[in-house]
Image (cartoon, grey):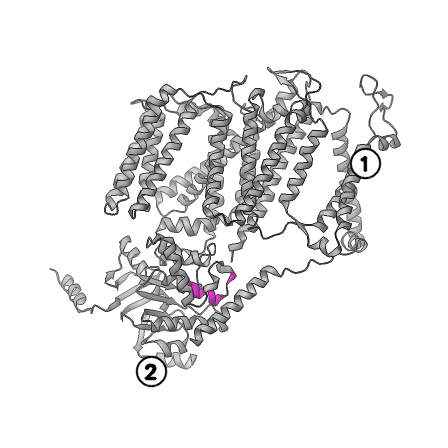
Amino acid sequence: MADTRAAAETAERGGAEDAQAVEALPPEQPGLPPSEWIRKNLFSSPFNSVLTVAFGLLALLIVRGLLNFTFSEERNWDAVRTNLRLIFTHAYPEEQYSRIWVCVGTIAVLAGLSVGLAAAETARRGVSVRKLSSSLVAMGATVALGVVLREPSALTDIEGRVRRDDSGIMRESFAEAMTDRWAWWLAAAVLASAGAALWFGFGDERRRETYVRPVELFMVGSAVLVLSGWIYPWGHYAFADGEFIAEPGRTVAMSTKLPWTVIWLLLAAAIAAGRSMRRAGAGPNFTLALNLCWLACPFVLYWVVLRDPDLDWGRVLSVDIPLGVLFAALGGAVLWLLTDQRIGELGRIIATLLMGVAVLNWVAGFFGWYPMLQKVRLSFLLVALAALVAHNFAGERSKRLRLLAVWVALMAVFHYMATLMNSPSTVETPTEALIGGFSVTLIVASFTLLFSFPLGVMLALARTSRLPIFRVMSTSFIEVVRGVPLITILLFFAVMLQLFLPDGMSISLIAAATLGYTLFSAAYLAENVRGGLQSIRRGQYEASDAVGLTAMQRTLFIVLPQALRVSIPPLVGQVIATFKETSLLAVIGAFDLLRMANNVIPSQTQFLGVKREGLLFVCLVYWVFAYAMSKHSQRLEKRLGVGER
Amino acid sequence: MSVSDATTALTEALAARDDMIVCEGVNKWFGDFQALDEISAVIKEREVVVVLGPSGSGKSTWIRCINRLEVHQEGRIVVDGIELSNDLRNIEKIRSEVGMVFQQFNLFPHLTVLDNITLAPIWVRKKPKRESDDTARSLLERVGIPEQAEKYPGQLSGGQQQRVAIARALAMEPRIMLFDEPTSALDPEMIKEVLDVMKELARSGMTMMVVTHEMGFAREVADRVIFMEEGQIVETGTPEHFFTDPREERTKLFLSQIL
C-alpha cells in the first residue's frame, strides 16, 4: 500500500513538472537598444565593420539593379497583365470559368477546415506583436529605400515613346522622380505607420506577449489583396480564339473581385468552422473524413468539375452499372470467403492464383490475345489485390461485414470514376489539352505526389525486405530510374508509352508525363524513406515482435510512422523539387506555366519577343508556392516533434 | 518408433504439467563465440527465477532465446507446452503468451502511453478498442501512473517509462513475464518504483524470469537463483543457499566482487 502511494506521489510530481515545462515558457529576452545592437552585430571589430560596409554596398547595388530592371520603361508589364488568364489556365473557355472558381473554392474550404482543426496542435503561438510591428516598420523603410535607389524615370513624348538625346535616354531630375513616386511613398508611410501604431498601441508588456497566428496574418494580407481588387483595376485582359483583343475597361480585377471575395469569405468561414469543431471535440473520424476528401479532391475536381464528362446513359445503364455491381458482388463473395478464419493457408493460395490471372489479363491485352474492357482488367486487379491482403482483416462477423462495405464503396467509386474518365468532355477548348498554364502545373504536381508517395514507400519497404525477389526488383528499379535524367524519362514516356499500352487504350501527353514524373519521384522518395527506415532502432522491432505483432502490423503501426516522421525534411525537399520540375512539361510540348512565359506570350503579335517580364513573373509564382511549402514543412516538423524522445 | 522419438516422448511425459519453460542442452554461437553452452533448466508455473552473472555471461541471450528474439542453434526450448521451431505460427503463439520487458524500455515513441498499451491487444488479440482502453487504464492504475495515459513516452521519466513497458506486456495477459535487466538503464532513485511493481507482480503469482543486478530483489522475491558464467549455468539454488552458502568457487568470487 505504502509502495503504491509513494509511486503515485512520484508520478504526480513528474506530472506537475511536465505541466510546468509546457506552460511556464521563459520570458522573452528584452532586446538590446538599437545603437547597442548595431555595435554588437555589425561593427564589433574593424574587420567586421569592413565586411558589413562592403557587403551592405553590394546588397544595395543588387537591389538597385533589380528595381531598375523591374520598373524600367523598356519593361512591358502589359504582357503579363493582359495574359494573366492565359498564364493560369491557358485556353480554358471563359464561359466555363465558374468551374475553376468551384475548384478554388473547394480547395479553400478544405484548407480552411484543416487549418482550423490543426490549430491547437501547433504549440507555438506565432509571431509576437513586437516582432510584427518592427518588421512592418522595416518593410516601410525598405520600400522607401527602393524608391530612393531606383534611377529616375525616362522622359516620354506624347505618343509614349522614350525620348533620347546624344547621351542616351533622357531622364527626369532626381527631385522630380522623388515627387512623382508619391504612391510608393504613401505605401512606405502606411506600412511604417501601421508598424508604429502597433508598437505604441500595445504596452511594452503586451507587445511582447500578444501573439498573432500565421493564419491570421495570411487572412489579413489576403483580405487587403482582395479588397484592392474593388478599388484598383488590376490587370486588363482579353484573349479569345487565340487572338489578343484590346478591350479597355475589362480588367482582371473587375471580373475576379467577386469570386475572390466569396472565396475569401468561404476560407474564413471554413477556418472558423474547423476551430469550433475542434473545440467541440471533433474526433479522429472527422480528420479521417477530411483527409479522404483531400485525397479525392484532385480526381473529382479534374474529372468531374473541370472536365464535365458527357455521360452516354444507354451505355452506362447497359454496361457500366452492371459491371460495377458484378464486381462488387463477386469481389465481395471472394473477400467473405477469404476472411473466414478456418480457410488458413488455402486462402493465401487462392489470392495468389487470382493475382496470377489478373496479371495474365494484362499480358494478354498487350499481345492482343483476347479483347477485354480496360475497366474489367483493372477491376480484376483490384479484386486480386484485396484478396491478397484479406487475411489481415479476418475476424468476427461485424468486422468482415465492415470490410465488405468498404469493398462495395471502393468498387462504386472506382467504377464511377472510370466511367467518367471514359466519357468525352463537354468543355470545348481550341487546344488539344483541356487546361494549361499554372493549372496544369498544379494538376500534374498533385497527381504525381498522390501516386508517387505510396509507390515510393512500397519501393523502400521492398528494398529493405527480407525476400530477395522484392529486394532485387526494387533496387534495380530505383537504380535504373536514378541513373537516367528526368527529361529523358519524360520524352521517353511522351513518345513511347503509347506503343506499350494494350490495344484500345490511349493516353494523353499530360497523363504520360505524369506517369513519368511519378516513377521518377517515387525512386527518389524511396531512397528518402529508406533513410528513415534505417534510423529506426532495433529495440523497436524487438518490442513489436515481443508483443506479438505480425510483420505487416509492425511495419504499418511502428516502423513506417516513425520512419516517415524522420524523413519529413528530405520528403518535403522532394515535393518541392517535383513541383518545380513540372516546368519540364514545357520542353516536351505541354502548355504549362513556363511555356506560357517562354513561348506563347512572346509569339503574340502585341507582345512579340516580350519574354523577360513573363519569366520574372513565373519565377515569382514558383517561388511563392515553393516557399509556402517549405514554411509549412517546418511547422509540420515542429508539430510532429511532440512525440519524439 | 525410433530411439530418439522414444526419448522425446519420455521427456514430455516426465515433464510435469506445470512446467512453463523447459530448456534442454541449448547451444548458441555468435560467429565463433559460444554464447550459450549446454543450458538446461526447468521453470515451473508461478515460479520467480532470477538469473545472475557477470556481464557477457549469456544471461540476456538466454532470456531472449525464450521468445525467439535470438535463435538458438542446438537443443530444445519448450514454452508452455509449445516447442520453439522455425514454424512462424508457433513463434507468434509463444510471443503472445510471453511478455517481455527490456533494459531500454523500447516504448513506441510516436504513440501515447495508452496506445502503446492497447496496440497489441487490439491487433493481436482482436479485442474491441473500448475494452482494451479499460484494461489499459486499470493496468496503469496497477503500476501507479494512471494520470499519464494521454502523454507520450518522451514526456515521462525513465521509471515511469519502464512501468508503462510492464503494463504494455501485461496487457496481452501473458502467462510468463521475461525481464531483461529492467532497472539497468534507470537512475538510482527510480529503481525502487520499478522493483515495487515487479514485486507486486511476483506476489500475484506470475511466472517470471528476471535478469538483473539487483541482489536485494533476488534475495527478497526469487524462488530460485540461477548463476551463469561464460554461457554456462554454474549454480542453481534458493536465495538463502545462494547468498549465504554457495558451493562453487566462481559463484563465491562473483558474490565477493559485488556484495
Specify the farthest residue to the bottom: B245
Horizontal side of residue A68 vs A512, given as left or right:
right
Let me know if residue A176 is in the magenta part.
Answer: no
Q: Which mark is residue B240?
A: 2
Mark 2 vs mark 1: tell me if same chain: no
- Residue at the (44%, 58%) spot, across then down: B114
Quadrant of the image containing the N terminus of chain B: bottom left
Provide the residue span drawn in magenta: B155-165
| Cα distance between the residues tagged 2 and 1 | 92 Å
Q: Which mark is residue A628?
A: none
Residue A597: image location, x then y, percent: 63, 25
Residue A112: image location, x then y, percent: 56, 40
Quadrant of the image containing the C terminus of chain B: bottom left
Horizontal side of residue B38 vs A187, given as left or right:
left
Asked if residue B229 shows in the view, the reply is no
Q: Which mark is residue A185?
A: 1
